[in-house]
Image (spheres, rainbow, N blue to C red):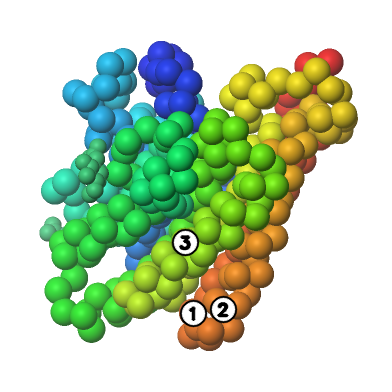
Amino acid sequence: METTRGFLGLPSWRILLCLAAGWMAAEAAPLPQYYNAIFSFGDSFSDTGNFVIINSGKLPNMPKFPPPYARCSNGRLVIDFLAEALGVPLLPPSANKGTNFSQGANFAVMGATALDLKYFRDNNVWSIPPFNTSMNCQLEWFQEVKDTICSSPQECKEFFGKALFVFGELGGNDYSFAWKAEWSLDKVKTQMVPKVVESIIGGIEALLDEGARHVLVPGNLPAGCIPITLTMYPSEDRSDYDPRTGCLKKFNGVALYHNAVLRVALDSLQRRRPDSRIIYADYYTPYIQFARTPHLYGTRREP
Ligand SMILES: *[C@@H]1O[C@H](CO)[C@@H](O)[C@H](O)[C@H]1NC(C)=O
Ligand SMILES: *[C@@H]1O[C@H](CO)[C@@H](O)[C@H](O)[C@H]1NC(C)=O
């Protein structure tokens, strides 16, 4: 497809985490409308056009395709399937100024991190490109969009109380920049994972303070199965690979560790905010199932 060719023309960090997410492919009749709108935050797993809009005219090889084509996928993303199933339009990218965002907006950007650029610079991680697209930047854009859809604090709170917020996946890129800067496994786990999770919890709390009541929080995917990881960090030692999947164990281990720490923090947040409904979404397990038993999903693993 045209979109795929456009993205393959980009240097590797720009296709970081660009994955087809066609795995929720089953068509389902829309449910009764539970939510008036969906607001989504995250990275390439849910970017519905922001990266392309923000960078059009700035970066070489930028595909010119307007939404809905400017996704890191040759098909729909998980967030698209959610919108379809919940009966709201596909989420317009927030960078598309002038759009009517009254049924939702998508703030996710390819390459976005849970931590701010400053964190990486302060910790001597220079592998991160100098974009201002982190979670906190996305929360600032949310404020701008908010001004276009509701006026009084009361009206806004009521509106957001009926919306679904999808917060993530976030963190996958943070770890990828740490690996690129040659952080050890121990350093990633003890120094970065707690910071990333703390940042995500802070972001969700900011949304709850705006009136959000329904927040879906996807965990990390198995980064050690992603082609770019397998390409960038090949190992001579077969024991570095999980024999059931061919994925690199170290990177998957960090994703699992992140998810465990995140779930504990979400449980605690749910207890502090009993009026809200905070839902963890496991994106890891289905992906691993595809890697373990691809024949069940219409494809084969290379021997
Ligand atoms: C935006 O869309 C909603 C319904 O989707 C509609 O009620 C509203 O009038 C629209 N706002 C503007 C400014 O067009
Ligand atoms: C990102 O934000 C920082 C701090 O606000 C600013 O100094 C910098 O110029 C911004 N970078 C880009 C690429 O917009």
Q: Which residue is drawn at 34% across and 56% down?
A: 136
Q: Which residue is drawn at 66% across and 51% down?
A: 189
- Where 103 sits versus 58, above or below? below
Task: Describe the element under mark 1 as helix, strand or loop.
Answer: loop
- Where 298 sits versus 123, above or below? above
Task: Describe the element under mark 2 as helix, strand or loop.
Answer: helix
Q: What residue type is labelled 1?
A: Ser
- x, y percentage for residue 131? 31, 38
Return the residue nearer the eye: 23 or 41.
41
- x, y percentage for residue 121? 39, 43
Q: Mark 3, residues whose alpha carbon is within 10 Å: few (<14), some, or many (≥20)? A: some
Q: Which residue is drawn at 48% across and 21% down?
A: 12
Return the residue nearer the eye: 262 or 66.
262
| Viewer-side label of 1, 3 | 3
- Left/right of residue 288 with respect to residue 187 in the rendered view: right
Give the residue at mark 2.
270
Q: What residue type is labelled 2?
A: Gln
- Where 104 sits versus 63, above or below? below
Give the residue at mark 3.
199
Distance between mark 2 and mark 1 Cα atoms: 7 Å
Give the residue at mark 1.
276
Q: Within the image, what quadrant is residue 205 found in?
A: bottom left
Q: Quadrant of the C terminus?
A: top right
Q: In which quarter of the image is ligand 1?
A: bottom left
